[in-house]
Image (spheres, rainbow, N blue to C red):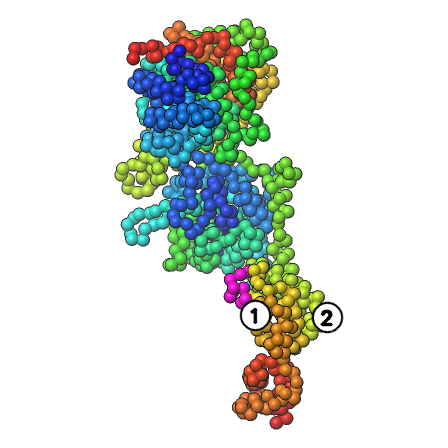
Amino acid sequence: MSILDRTACDLRDALRRGEVSAAEATEACLAAVERLEPAVHAFASVGADAARARAAGVDRRRDAGEDVGLLAGLPVAVKDNMATADGLPTACGSRILRDWHAPYNAHVVERLLEEGAVILGKTNMDEFAMGSSTEHSCFGPTHNPWDTDRVPGGSSGGSAAAVAARMVPLALGSDTGGSIRQPASLCSVVGLKPTYGRVSRYGLVAFASSLDQIGPIARTVGDAALLLQAVAGHDPRDSTSVPETDAPVPDYLAALEEPVEPLRIGVPKEFFGEGLRPEVERVVRDAIATCEGLGAEIVEVDLPHATDYAIATYYLVAPSEASSNLARYDGVHYGHRAAEAADMIDMMMRSRSEGFGDEVKRRIMLGTFALSSGYYDAYYKKALKVRRLVRQDFDAAFERCDCIMGPASPTAAFRLGERLDDPLAMYLSDLFTVGASMAAIAGVSIPAGFTDDGLPVGLQILSGVFTEDRLLRIARMVERETHLTDRRPPVCEEPA
Amino acid sequence: MSGSEPIPTIGMEVHLHLATRTKMFCPCEVRYDAPPNTRVCPVCLGMPGVLPVMNERAVELAVRMALGLNCDIPDFAKWDRKHYYYPDLPKNYQISEYDEPLGLGGHLDVERDGETFRARITRVHLEEDAGKLVHAEDGSNVSEVDLNRTGTPLLEIVSEPDIHSAAQARAYGEALRQLAVYLGVGQCNMQLGQMRFEPNISLRIGEGTGGSPRYTPITEIKNLNSFRSLERACDFEIARHRDELAADPEGYTLQRLGKSTRGWNDDRGTSFLQRSKEEAHDYRYFPEPDLVPVHPHEVLQDGSSLVDRVKEDMPESLEEKRQRYIDMGLSREQADIFIQEEDLGNCYVNLLNCLDTLGATLTWSDDGRDAEVARNWIEQDVRRALNERGVRVSGLEHFSEERLAELIVLVDEGTISREVGSRVFDLMLESGQSAAEIVEAENLAQTSDAGQLEAVVDEVIAENPDAARQFADGVDKAVGRLIGMAKKKTGGKANPKVVREILIKKLRGG
């Protein structure tokens, strides 16, 4: 089996047995990047030399019998909103940070390096993670490996596409309102958004601080579990990261193959309402029926606030926080600075006007308005109240079921440009994912099947806070039945 | 409007740096003498992706000050972001406590010219300081940013408008500084910018329609960094309000003009408009999502809460301590000196106790004179010794209050004079011998032998016929001079009491 076709867990075993070296794995991935990037454009930057040097180091240390870590020699891609001090920029898909080199490593990057991972490059994304198509990037759009005329979803579209196109077995994404799960769904990969607080946000360039969460994107549930294992856990530099005493990190791989029995699956009618494309619904219902065939009990649950209300309030909370988090990009201390300006304020205004794209500006304006004196109570404060209702919906539902299943995205991958001029349509891409974000619970999208046009459809599975271990086991149950992990996207089949 | 004189009405906002080793939200050291931009890290530089981590010591000190100001400490306090664009604020927002601060509703009693007034404290809250802009002095229109100060823990104390003169504003500032220093909350070094004042000034101009008071517009003077500029700015502003009011008695009102912000030019002694009501910032406060709220009363695993811990560690209140000193015979001013210089204060208390132990034989132990004598020794001799050696009391070699008390008793008994006592004190510290041993070894005991002294007095009178004549004319001062001369002749050993008696007898008799 070629290196690229191996799952991360397989490749890890092969590396351990000495059948494959880290250098070989890295070269294979770099070659795939070179071959596929013109069609996919999943990366914002690639650090080939640094990756080769790291791989050689891992091989050397392994040969010397040293402990090389959980991910030793595995190539990993990192979304471009995670700080890397290794020479690659951390641009967040934005002109304003295009040449910014972080002076420090994000917590997750530190963890990857400690576990021996080989960071191959930084993946493309919607600017500051605002978007659902990876079209809002100063580096240009990423293309869906299953149909390069279509978007990969977003904002972690680069990570999802890189994994789907088998350029790299593992990637980190970040999810604020669905930015891991939705592209995973559109690219037929596994994308897991952990519970808020499970993974440190230190070094993740903030979009909406109370929602942002880093998670793994991989081809299999096992690979996602492996990567989550490496990055989960308390970090004193993030006050919102959960202390080990409150929620210890379990061994995600140990019990992965054990089915959850009995399994009660909650199916909310709100996830099968208006806006859901019939062909997506068919695939998702088939997947749920498969679970039923395995003996799971289907429970109807109500999530009255988890879709419409959640999306309305999400678009108050997230832009409000974004307007604050993005205030620092003013051209004074780092990042893009306008060439000419009359005075200081003019310099700040010009730098921001030139540096930010339209979608980012739109959200900054929304958020600035929502936080303005006299509007705060009506918008942001009220949104926080609705947020509590969303959480209560899920708490009540999880008293009656072990997980909730539904679609991750209302549609399969749409065409590039199709929604660029229709922000509201774009925002509705998150209809089924924002609820879990607002409730701060765990969720995953796994491949469930394909539309008649051959476009991937994901199954979203949600579970309560800090139950990622159970969530992964349920996902693995489904994965074993669907047999989708070996299916290659057309872009990989094209002649070199 | 009634015809009564307008009353200045001032509420104060005071900022002070807390005495923490590190900054409010990052591990950078707080330093005032470091080269620009050397005490910074990605967190206080506001780099993309960084997160703040609360400095618990700063929260403890804030609660300590709030308790010192008799505030209530709420069950819940939270962090908020306050947004404004300025190059010395790297995130373009400041982390502060907006509507749920750490301290609410206290008071500070302030003494001025023998009268005490009470300023109610509205709130005490914690925030991070901004950096500094250094404007080039060569007129090149260049400003440099120094972010060493960025993120320094800053306590803001807001008073009710209970202050009614510039002098009171100053006294309030001084009292606040004394309390902060006494509690160890801040060093409040004005030159270093560790304490800054922002008075909100208005004149109360009697009753409006409906009986509620009318005011001139509120002006807030920003960033005053000395007591002198605080007092001058308040005086200037009060006078300016009076002038404006005289020019437009009906129009110059808070209702019409609202609140404005002014700066202070200390060289010119004038204030200038910075922002009018229309230009007021919308700070767009919202809860800081990167930090968790503080629960000061929450009982932790060790069985105590943050407030418990701070209370346990609180010294007696400043008022109690001051009163205790006053009860020990000190003036209020001296009490405040000993409060500020704690080791001298402790030395004083110990010395009084030691004198008490030896007290049975003290001749001046009534009328609080022992307090004055003890104070005098500490202020003169002990302070001088400390200054010469550059040490604190604990580091003063061969010193103990007990040994000093023994020396004082020798002076009291007339064995040596006060002047010789100072010499003995120095020798004590040098040699480690007791006062009595030194007096013995150096033969310093006072001469009270009348026969011996009579000869000396005769000599002095003979050498100073003018002084003798002056005394005869009733000039008392002359006696002092003659006694001084007699002492000089005996190397300081002549007992001045005995000399005086002999002198008076001889001059009268003569």
- Is residue B355 found left or right of B55 in the rendered image? right
Frontmost residue, A426 versus B120: A426
Q: Is residue B440 visible from the viewing direction of this image? A: yes
- Is residue B480 found left or right of A113 in the rendered image? right
Q: Is residue A314 inside the magenta stretch?
A: no
Query: Residue A338 location, x and y as percent?
Result: 29, 36
Query: Residue A371 location, x and y as percent?
Result: 45, 33
Report the chain holding disc 2. Answer: B
Query: Residue B464 location, x and y as percent?
Result: 53, 90
Residue depicted at 57% across the width and 54% down the height = B182
Badge 2 or badge 1: first in the primary sequence: 2
The span from disc 2 to disc 1 (Cα, nearest Å) is: 26 Å
Report the chain holding disc 1. Answer: B
Of the 4 image quadrants, the one containing the C terminus of chain B is bottom right
Q: Amino acid at mark 2?
A: Ala
Residue sticking out furthest to the front: A64
Q: Is residue B387 inside the magenta stretch?
A: yes
Query: Residue B34 location, x and y as percent?
Result: 41, 50
Q: Which residue is mark 2?
A: B360
Secondary structure of the residue carrying numbered label 2: helix
Residue depicted at 42% across the width and 40% down the height = B41
Frontmost residue, B227 versus B372: B372
Frontmost residue, B502 versus A6: A6
Q: Amino acid at mark 1?
A: Asp
Q: Which residue is mark 1?
A: B426
Q: Which mark is residue B191?
A: none
Secondary structure of the residue carrying numbered label 1: helix
Q: Is residue B230 visible from the viewing direction of this image? A: no
Which stretch did the figure color magenta? B384-392
